Amino acid sequence: MKQMLLGVYFVLLSCSPALGAEWEDIVAAAAGQTVYFNAWGGSQPVNAYIEWAAERVQEKYKVRVVHVKVTDIGDVVSRVLIEKSAGKDTGGSVDLMWLNGENFKAMKENNLLYGPFSRKLPHYALADIKNKKNLLYDFTVPVDNLESPWGAAQLVFLYDSKRVPEHPQSMGDLLAFAEKNQGKFTYPAIPEFHGTTFIKQALMELIEDPEVLNHPMIASDFDAHTRPLWDFLDRLHPRLWRNGKVFPDSASRMFSLLNDGEIHISLSFNPNAAANAVENGELPPTVRTYVHASGTIGNAHFVAIPFNSSAREGAMVFADFLLTPLAQAKKADPKIWGDPTVLDIQRLSPEDGALFDALPRSPATLAPEDLGRVLPEPHVSWVQALEKAWLKKYNQ
Amino acid sequence: MLPLTSLGKSGFFPVFIMASFGLTLLAGLLGTVLPSLDYLPVIGHTRFSWSPWQEFLSYPGIFSSIRVTLISGITASASAVGLSVFWACCAHGSRTWRLFEKALSPLLSIPHAAFAIGFGFLIAPSGWLVRMVSPGITGFSSPPDWILLNDPYGLSLAAALVIKEIPFLVMVMISAMGQLDMEKTLLAGRALGYKKEQIWLKILIPRLYPHIRLSVFAVIAYSFSVVDMALILGPGSPPALAVQILKWFNDPDLSLKLVAACGSLFLFALVGAGIGAAFLMEKILGFFLAPWVVNGRRRSILTRLKPLFLLPGLGIMGITGAATLLLVIWSFARQWQFPEVLPASWSLKFWTTGLVSCFYPFVTTLLTGMAAALLGLVLTIGCLEHGAGAKRKGTRNLNTPVFYFLYLPLLVPQISFMAGIQLVLVVVNLDGSWITLLWSHLIFVLPYLFMVLQTTYLSYDQRFWDQALLLKRSYFPALFRIKLPMLVRPVLFSFAIGFSVSVAQYIPTMVVGAGRFSTLTTEAVSMASGSDRRALAVYALLQQALPMIIYALALITPKILYYNRKGMQV
């Protein structure tokens, strides 16, 4: 393994000497640093994977990575914000954080992020930025190298094939399913981001002119464009779990509901979530995955360095390690975590490519080619308006 | 010895507590009040205005959130107090009561969140109770779509709160009972022809209540501002106000922090109103029931209702026991689906993984809890000694104002209070150090230590103290060789309470500790944000085990120390 990694470095170093020299300095400065990696800690497989990665960089670079297990990365955004307001521009308590979407937007807008570091990472060159636009635009907000990609995500639906003989293919089908199976579907209450993604997906499928979603929202047209969505939700809600009077607070909670048979269809952002959950017994072996025929929303998740990190170099070394084919392939293994890679597999060396070819396939999840079209996120301006409107209509 | 002696007498402890708590509170309060008035420079809000309040009051579903908080908070605190009182009246001295007393420590040591998870899995439509009778009796092959949990009124939350709070109130009552000459009162009452439960209700409770009043207030504050249990059992959208505040705080839209600050102040006001109402109620009841107390009637409806009021005790023990048992089963489960009563397959994996990853959190939890409880005891005893001295000599007792400082942290919603403190700590570069972490735990440990120890300590028989001084000639030997050894039982018990309060702290640990310190609770809470109930069960049980061990030690130690002293046996 080590030799292979070294090989990759050698290739990369030889292509861009300037980058190589700078990176060597970074690696040298990183040795001995402690990186406080603030990341959601609600999943044992993910925690175990982070621990494994931490051990590797400790061995190889003498960088100590401590996983600060948080329940909500919003906590950490608050902490960095408070440090900024207290004038603590160096020696901050957070060195690296796992985030995306609105939290990234908030940090970027409030200048809470350290500079464009991802282009300094040797393995960033392998990231599939050509084909995966959402590595450059995090929920349509330009990433500007302020965060380094970690994993790809796509909205998928999980269903129990024992109880659902034929899965829906569209939002229309889903409504028909709900009408036939009272109370067997639900989605997390807005503004939980799986919930928000679900209504964004519904809007994309139902809106007359999907093209408008790629542009900033115009307030005067909002009602007209979103009317089909609210009509749909008005019809769907009485058919939902608990008659739509109660919503679960997270997609995690929906996993338990699926296992308990309270609902028959759940959703996830990790296309391989079902494989991992079936593998470790969290969900029954009859669980399968599907996507809608017209495609589903895809995005990515990243790691970023706060502006006042006290171990920037160490954080970069860790972020780079997370992008190595070795780390990415291990992460993509459904037995370990099952989180899809952000690398361009075509561009990997044969040895590295073989790591991905060797990954086990599970019947619980779709093969990458069956995941269908990946839809881009609607322009970020739609999100807040949608959330506000949903809360106003249904949060009573 | 002399300087130390004078330290105790001069009121050093009360003054120290007032000064340090006062500063902490001020920081916390400023950090809440300023943002609520639109002042938070770091996100560009520098002009004072009422706009956060307008946004707060027009936030969708805000009135439903307030309603949930009011309904669940009032139901929970009123039922907890009512049931504890009636239960004590009817059950005290019975076999159930003695059993309950034995079960108190485990009941108290179960963390709220862990209990909520077990309780939820017990009563959910897909839960254990329904599984027991499915599909056999009910015919359900998939769970019924009933709103039993997360109901829009917060009643399931209230039920769980009541179950958690009654043991706490009963514990406080028991510790206060030592102050009343119970046996004599009961004997005299019996001789006059009153039934036991009447003596309790008419004579003992009115005398007991002043001793438990502060605990009742703490119960009210807790019921209104609980977050962890409300996340699990409360409604989701809109959630209880305390949960909504937390959501605002963590929202990527940073301007919602201003709204969160308004929410915190509003919740603070609700708690204040709740406590005011309880106080008023006490006075009104006292006024109107006075004639009833002396009406001389010997017959009471309570006698007939007596069997009914034995139920709460049994119910609490049964439900808590079942909830814990469920956690144990989950922790060994691999696959467990509806309607199976027991898991289809088992695994030790979650224990092995959990135990390995919990080593450092375990050590941190133990050390911090021990240090907080110990330091808390020193401060509490220091204050109480000052109070005792003042009472003896008729000098000014500085303890009265201390209580206000002590109890305020319990009444303010933790999350906003902590955000203010965090700002100050970051400014003075003290965040993320163990000492400040310890301090933040102490803020919440100290009030409970006071609550538990105060009455027993202050009613220590003056004649013993005079004898002790005569024998030992000076203050400290008398304190350490005579008085404290005699009080070892309540002191150790309050130590255990303090320890378990420290163990339960999540927000202070994360906020003040800057993520540098992981404890069993931070591990358990982060697990709770995931979906894996098996891993969560392991962490919840580990989190529960440590306080339970400390409670057990606190109960056993005096028995071992004084096995040969008849007067010290209980």
Image (cartoon, grey):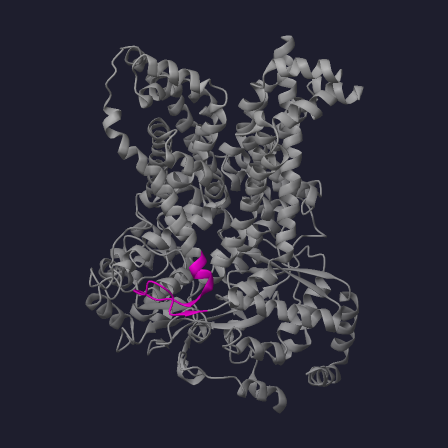
Q: Is residue A295 visible?
A: yes
Locate the N terminus of chain A by quadrant.
bottom right
- Above/below status of B188 relative to B165: above
Is B200 magenta? The answer is no
Furthest residue to the top?
A: B394
* Relative image position of residue A229 (x, y in whole percent): 29, 63
Region rendered in magenta: B328-346
Q: Residue B246: image x %, image y %?
A: 47, 46
In percent of width and height, residue A176 lies at: 22, 70
Q: Nearer the viewer, residue A68 or B441?
A: B441
Q: Position of residue B264 (x, y in %)?
A: 47, 37
Q: For residue A371, what is the image quadrant?
A: bottom left
Q: Is residue A106 left or right of residue B142?
A: right
Q: Residue at x 62, y 8 (%)?
A: B394
* Residue positioned 44% across, 76% down in the render: A275
Where A131 falls versus A95 (above or below)?
below
Identity of the residue furthest to the bottom in this view: A350
Q: Is residue B345 left or right of residue B23?
A: left
Left or right relative to B112: residue B426: right
